[in-house]
Amino acid sequence: MSTRGRGLHGHVLECLGPAITAGEYPPGSVLRTDELAQRFEVSRSVMREAVRVLESMYLVESRRRVGVTVRPKAEWNVYDPQVIRWRLAGADRPHQLRSLTVLRSAVEPVAAGLAARHATAEQCAELTECALGMVATSRGHQLEGYLVHDVAFHRVILNASGNEMFARLGDVVTEVLAGRTHHEVMFEDPDPAAVTLHVKVAEAVREGDAVRAEELTREITVGALHELDILAP
């Protein structure tokens, strides 16, 4: 597909995806590809490609002589980073943030404990570097810079756990951390206590202290839930 084709296909997705996840097209709604192609002023082939992507996310299904039908929310691929991004951009944001943060609280402490047992020297060094980067950007309203180090920190934890299922949640955690920042569900500067906890987690992992790494990471995730109580009730 040409560059222009990819651009048109992306434009259609960025209009339809958020509309579906926001409930503008309720489950069972039938979308006619011909009508959508006219509405978005794109070719049928571009429209079909966009629909294929939505199908891969289980947001819709295509049926002959019926059209493209919006699937029930229970069938959506809620772990798809793009679906998460669309839901965080809509009215469902508070519920989505809370759901994702609860998931983090269940997974990340265990992952940190495993990381303390399995992390390589390189991963330990990377974790320390990320934590120091968080400290360096934790003041002066540098939330975007802080986000880069925060995302990298949590990816290292998940990867260093040695569990491939946890590692695959890296994109999910990235989206929730980015969503908190981009949708201003954060204080102007990160909580100093949370920043310190990240430094301590890096130390615990480096020292091979699995119990402490798990306990400290649980404090981080509990703190994130408390932030939501204040900023996104």
Image (cartoon, helix red, strand yellow):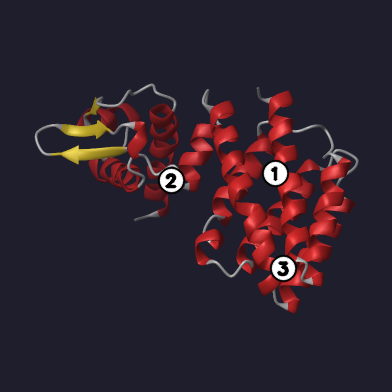
Residue at position x 41%, y 35% in the image: 17
Look at the image and tell me whether residue 233 can be seen: yes
**Amino acid bearing label 2:** Gly
Residue at position x 23%, y 32% in the image: 69
- Would you call the spot at circle 2 few (<14 residues within 10 Å), some (14-19), or many (20 or more)? few
3D distance between C-alphas at marks 1 and 3: 18 Å
Q: Which quadrant holds the C terminus?
A: top right
The residue tagged with tag 2: helix, strand or loop?
helix
Q: Which mark is residue 221?
A: 1
Residue at position x 29%, y 34% in the image: 71
Determine the residue located farthest toward the left in the rendered image: 65
Q: Which mark is residue 7?
A: 2
**Amino acid bearing label 1:** Thr
The numbered mark, 1 or 2, whose residue comes first in the sequence reads 2
Q: Kindly indicate the quadrant of the structure image that contains residue 58.
A: top left
Foreground pick, 12 / 174: 174
- Would you call the spot at circle 3 few (<14 residues within 10 Å), some (14-19), or many (20 or more)? many
The numbered mark, 1 or 3, whose residue comes first in the sequence reads 3
Look at the image and tell me whether residue 129 can be seen: no
**Amino acid bearing label 3:** Ala
The residue tagged with tag 3: helix, strand or loop?
helix
Foreground pick, 95 / 81: 95
Residue linked to disc 3: 116
- Front: mark 2 or 3: 3
Residue at position x 86%, y 45% in the image: 138
The numbered mark, 2 or 3, whose residue comes first in the sequence reads 2
Foreground pick, 181 / 117: 117
3D distance between C-alphas at marks 2 and 3: 44 Å
Q: Kindly indicate the quadrant of the structure image that contains residue 27.
A: top left
